[in-house]
Image: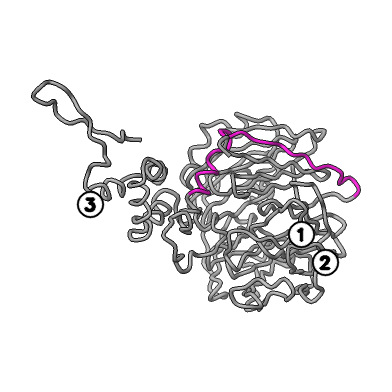
Amino acid sequence: MHSLTMREPLSDGGHSSQSSLADLPNELLEKVFLFCDGITIKRLSAVCKKFNTMVINLSRLKDVWKKCVFTEIGKEIADELSRYCSGGKRLDNSLYLNDFYYKLYVKWCRSLNVGKWPSTDTPINGFFQNPISCIKVSGDLIIMGHKDGCVSICDYLSQNIEIACRHIRMVTDIALIDLAGQDSYSIFKSRVGAISNHHHIVSISKDQNVRVYPIQSASIMNKYSHLAFKPASSELNYVRVFGEYCAIYANSMKIFLWKMSLSSPGCVDVNKPLNFSLFAVVTSPDRLPGWFNLWENKVRCFCAGRGILHEINVENAYSCSSRRLRLPRLGTGPYSQYISRAFVLRKKTIILVMVSGLLYYSIDGETLHDFPIYKHFTSKVITLALWGGILALGLECGQLAIYRCPTISDLALLHDQKPVYKLHLDRRDEPIISLDIDDYGKGPVVVAATHNAVSVLKWFSSDD
């Protein structure tokens, strides 16, 4: 960061004097501030009252934090940090601390402190009789899908666990919904004041059913707030949510698209169900099993058999374009023989986990690059999560590795870097089967799960 003072020429008497930046005209200071990055602006606002007032004015009149978000972070990561909710109307408040883009910027900065800030590791055990199949984290809560069909909510502050929903067969995936765009929600009844960043859960199962319900214990949940429907006659594999859209991928290679809305516009009513309106059913173009993601107004489906990424426009669901990835030569057979799992992330990011345990990644949706993970690990990658400035890898040996990835282009630099944080979960070398990342209000939180246990890793500023 540049010095906050500047020296004047020596006086006739040969003595030097200093003039603070605070003595410069406001018009000139504004121009200087606008050339600074967000971290510098944040620090300048704490220098003196005059600087603080100027930053407030820049936030209100010049959208300085919006500029910082889109120039330093990028729209894709900003969408991710905001839970896919737009800023809407600017808050009628002079304090920039309530600025939508300021909050995004601070959340992004916090995610870059993994491996720098102090951390805590909270183990949650006892799932041997009811193994975990998938997890999501929202603020202070962990939402877990189980092999027996239960969906449970764990307040990891008190480690209290409540059942939220029951499917007949194994829960295959979970997604979390935030249509109101609030900072946090206190829907879940917690003895220690745990909050969530979402208000509803959508879970799918091998029983072919979709269930949508508030983040509450089933014991107090209003039965009329629960929504259940069966879109397909085959198992449901993946569910994705982006803003007001929900997409579900079935084992029959069909993709179901819904539009969601609150029962009461602008207000979360946990006693009424969300509105779900099915507007399209699309068959995967290759008619082959694949992996998919929903981002903005497009569904992207990666079919491993031919190494092709298909894009389907949500607003015109029968408009499909395809791009063939430039896959490296892996052998003589179809690519599906060599690809164990594919993660279609954000807008164009794809990470392939090979049967051999190696990783390939693409940041443009077209060209794959090798990520030589064997330089740092001897175990295979099972799962991963990418959020904000954090990339977390879960390994077969039960080890968790975390990288800092401030921008999308930084993925291309990871092959030369070591993890900033490594931890071997004390789970008898059980593989990590599910990962998720979020921000709990004071720093990032990474949740890693084996079939039988969960670990909650939190980072916090030493100033808190």
Report how far apart the C-alphas of labels 3 and 2 lie in the structure.
57 Å
- Give the residue displayed 75% in from the left and 34% down from the top: 425
- Quadrant (top left, top right, bottom left, bottom right) of the C terminus: top right
Q: Mark 3 belongs to which amino acid? A: Glu
Q: Which residue is mark 1?
A: 189
Magenta stretch, residue numbers: 106-129
Q: Which residue is mark 3?
A: 27
The local secondary structure at tag 1 comes to loop
Say few, some or many: other residues with alpha carbon within 10 Å of mark 3 (under 14 / 14 to 19 / 20 or more).
Answer: few
- Give the residue displayed 68% in from the left and 30% down from the top: 378
Q: Which residue is mark 2?
A: 220
- Pick whichever of labels 3 and 1 is earlier in the sequence: 3
Q: Is residue 396 above or below residue 407?
A: above
Front-most of residues 55 and 408: 55
Front-most of residues 324 and 152: 152
Say few, some or many: other residues with alpha carbon within 10 Å of mark 1 (under 14 / 14 to 19 / 20 or more).
Answer: some
Looking at the image, the residue that sits furthest to the left is: 12
The local secondary structure at tag 3 comes to helix
Whether residue 325 sits left or right of residue 71 in the image: it is right
Whether residue 5 sits left or right of residue 195 in the image: it is left
